[in-house]
Amino acid sequence: MKRLPAIWVLAMTGLGLVSLALPGEGASSANYSSAPAVLDAGGARSASAKYTHDGSLGGFGGTVINVTTRETNRVGYAGQLLEPVSLTVSVPSTNINEATGQQLSAVARLDNGSVTMTADWNVLNGPIAALSPDGLLTAANVYQDTPATILAAAEGLTKSVGLLIKNVGLDDYGLYASDGIPDLWQVQQFGLNNPYATGPQALFAYTAGLNPTNPADVFTFNLSTVSTQANWRNLSFAPRYTNRTYLVEYRTNLAAGGFTTLTNGKVTDVGIARTVADTNAVSSQRYYRVKITYP
C-alpha cells in the first residue's frame, strides 16, 4: 500500500517535545513512540472466533458475518438494494402442551445470500395465550386437542405455521377448572363457561351417566318388599352402566353411625336396570343409598 508523506507537527508540553504524524509514518518523542500505521486493511479479511470481516476503508464498508447466529451484515454498499427470497420458521415441536411455552425463530434469506433473523409474529387463530415480539409463544389451556396458526412476517415475506395445542389436564379449563368434572364433558353438555355445568347436580349427572339437559333422563331408586320372603327387600335402580361401579349401602339410624356396604345382596340385572335384594332386612327400619364410582 502506498504510504502518505509524513507531516510533522511539533507541540510543547510539560513532558517535553511531542511529535505527531499522519498515517504512513511512525511518531516519537522523548517520552513516546508509535509504530507506522496504514489507512486500512485494503480489503483484506480479519477474523475472530465469532466473526469474519471482509472490509475496506478501515471498516467503513464491507461484510461482517456472525458464525454463531448465521447473520450477515453488509456495510457501506451504497445504492445496492437487497431482495428477500425465502422465509423459514423454526418451531421446536408443532405439538405443544397446554399452558407451556416454546421459542420460535425465523430466518429471512436475501438474494445475496445474507440473512436476517428478525420477524413480526402474529396469532391467526387458536388458543395462544401470548406471543412476544421475539417469538416466545405460550399456549392457553384447552378442553381438547385444538389447532392453532401463527404467522411470521419479515422483509416483505410471510410464513404461517400450524400447531396443535395438546390437552394434558382433564379439569383445568376456564370456569370448569378444578371442579371434579372433566372439561370436555361440560363443554359437550353445556357449552363454554356455563355456570350450570358446575356444582353437585352437574357432578351427579356426569357420575351417573345422565344427560343433564334432558329432564326425562333421571336416576331412579326404588324399595319394595318381596312377597315370598318376609325379611327381604328389593332395591331397584337405573340406569346402570358397565363402566361404572355401584355399591348399595345401608344404615339403621340417620342420627348416628355411618353407612355400611350391603354384602349379602342378591343382584339381578335386566337391561340398564339393576335389582339388589337385601336378604337380611330384619330391622324395623333401614336406610339405603347407592354409591356410584366413575371412572
Image: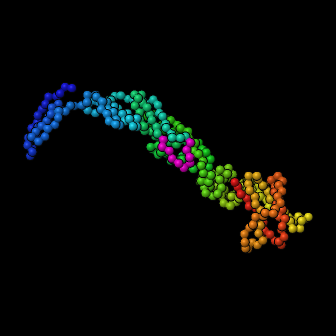
Where is residue 209, by image quadrant? bottom right
Residue displayed at 62% across by 47% down: 144
Quadrant assignment for the N terminus = top left
Chief SS of the magenta region: strand
Q: Is residue 265 left or right of residue 40?
A: right
Q: Indicate the position of residue 199 as horizontal and vertical percent values.
A: 66, 60
On screen, residue 292 above or below 103? below
Which quadrant is home to the C terminus? bottom right
Q: Who's the residue at 73% across and 74% down the image?
A: 255
- Where on the picture, by quarter, is residue 230? bottom right
Residue 169 place in picture, x, y as percent = 60, 51
Residue at the far top in the pictured view: 2
Residue 95 figure quarter: top right
**Residue 52 visible:** yes
Magenta stretch in the rendered image:
95-104
Residue at (84% x, 65% y) in the render: 279
Residue found farthest to the right: 228
Q: Is residue 283 magenta?
A: no
Q: Nearer the viewer, residue 39 or 266?
A: 266
Farthest residue, direction front = 264
Place of residue 65 in the rendered image (x, y in percent of width and height, measured from the top left):
36, 33
What residue appears at the point 84 percent right and 62 percent down from the top-left corner? 277
